[in-house]
Amino acid sequence: MRAIMGMIDLVSPDAAARDRAARAAAPLALYIHWPFCVSKCPYCDFNSHVRATVDEAQWHDALLADLAHEAALLPGRRLGSIFFGGGTPSLMPPATVAALIEAATRTWAPLGDVEITLEANPSSVEAARFADLAAAGVNRVSLGLQALDDDALRFLGRAHDVREGLGALEVAQRHFGRVSFDLIYARPGQTPAAWDAELARALAFGTEHLSLYQLTIEPGTRFATEAAAGRLTIPDGDTAADLFELTRARTAAAGLPAYEISNHARPGAESRHNLAYWRYRDYAGIGPGAHGRRDHLATFRRKKPENWLAAVARNGHGLESEEPLDPATRVGEALLMGLRLREGVDVASIAAAGGMRVAEIVDLAAIAALPDLIVLEGERLRVTDAGMILLDAILPKVVR
């Protein structure tokens, strides 16, 4: 361990300048939030809202204004990805989607083939918009299938059934070059055999990417209320670990290995936009509740749709705050995000960018004591496959 510390525990005097240059050269990611849903799912703690009516023209203009404000603060950047999230952005008018894509690619020079992702619910109504969304410029869609079992979909509060969801998947595969979909597992009463069969069916559809999330009880959701009352119990830790290991083995065998704790893709089909988050690159966030990271500032938009609209009308943008990130916070965020990835992080570069030594940001003795769970190979720190299921327990032990 002393040899490792001697090799990588140095801080370059111009590390901060190199970090600024690297961030400016890296592709910029743009996140656009559409906050509206048809209904609120009982497990969801995202910034989503149900409204009887939406003034689409007002939202079109407000989103463009919020985008213009961020663009003025990030001149000369190259655009690598756009992500329409929500809420349910497949409810957005395709003309608004097209206008935002045009404004973004006019403002920031596209870096090659820009990845443009839109999250979509797999209802037949929204699938009918897929051709127009593709014509607007969307080239990757992420479908919220969530389950391939009708009873499970009812439990999860989804508005579609399996037949309708698979119909939407077929339409998506016809119109978009890149398709991903989400599934939620570790549901109450779900056995490894049942999940194995459901996952095998999912893999047979041939998409390039799957996001597979264990059901968690988030504060403030209806499921949290049900769990507190003893009416909802999710699988225990041992069962969840078995399901997690089964998931990684099955997807790897199918050629979609895990590249992040919950995301699986064919090599080269990883989400470029989400990689920008996990690799701790700059990203601009617009729309209600959107977060961003801009030149070592954390940006926050007003969360409630009506408050965000009022702020845009008043100020020309929906910002609520911009908070400077001190070096220790930046280092911590970079480690916590990057260690979710199978590739891990360049711990020496992260330390140098914060003006610190490696031993100041990670506990090298703790890492050496957990060789089956986390490893330091040269300057790269990564969590092993065995360690990923224990990530939340490992991080407090090794990140200072």
Image (cartoon, helix red, strand yellow):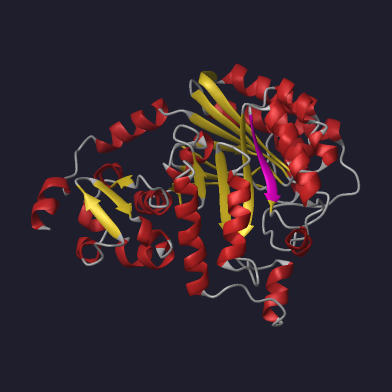
Can the viewer see residue 36? Answer: no
- Residue drawn at 21 percent across, 57 percent down: 359
Q: Is residue 297 left or right of residue 131?
A: left
Q: State the residue in front, 17 or 338.
A: 338
Can the viewer see residue 153? Answer: yes
Examine the residues drawn in magenta and state their main secondary structure: strand
Give x and y (percent) for residue 178: 60, 31
Against 102, is 171 above or below? below
Give x and y (percent) for residue 200: 58, 51
Q: Is residue 360 left or right of residue 77?
A: left
- Residue drawn at 55 percent across, 40 percent down: 209
For the record, the magenta segment spans 140-145
Q: Is residue 383 left or right of residue 61?
A: left
Q: Which quadrant is the N terminus positioned in?
A: bottom left
Q: State the residue in front, 42 or 269.
A: 269
Give x and y (percent) for residue 226: 72, 75
The quarter of the picture where residue 225 lies is: bottom right
Against 317, is 193 above or below? below
- The single residue placed furthest to the bottom in the displayed view is 230
123 part of magenta stretch: no
Give x and y (percent) for residue 355: 26, 46
Q: Which quadrant is the C terminus positioned in?
A: bottom left
- The single residue placed furthest to the right in the displayed view is 52
Q: State the residue in front, 229 or 141.
A: 141
- Residue drawn at 85 percent across, 34 percent down: 56
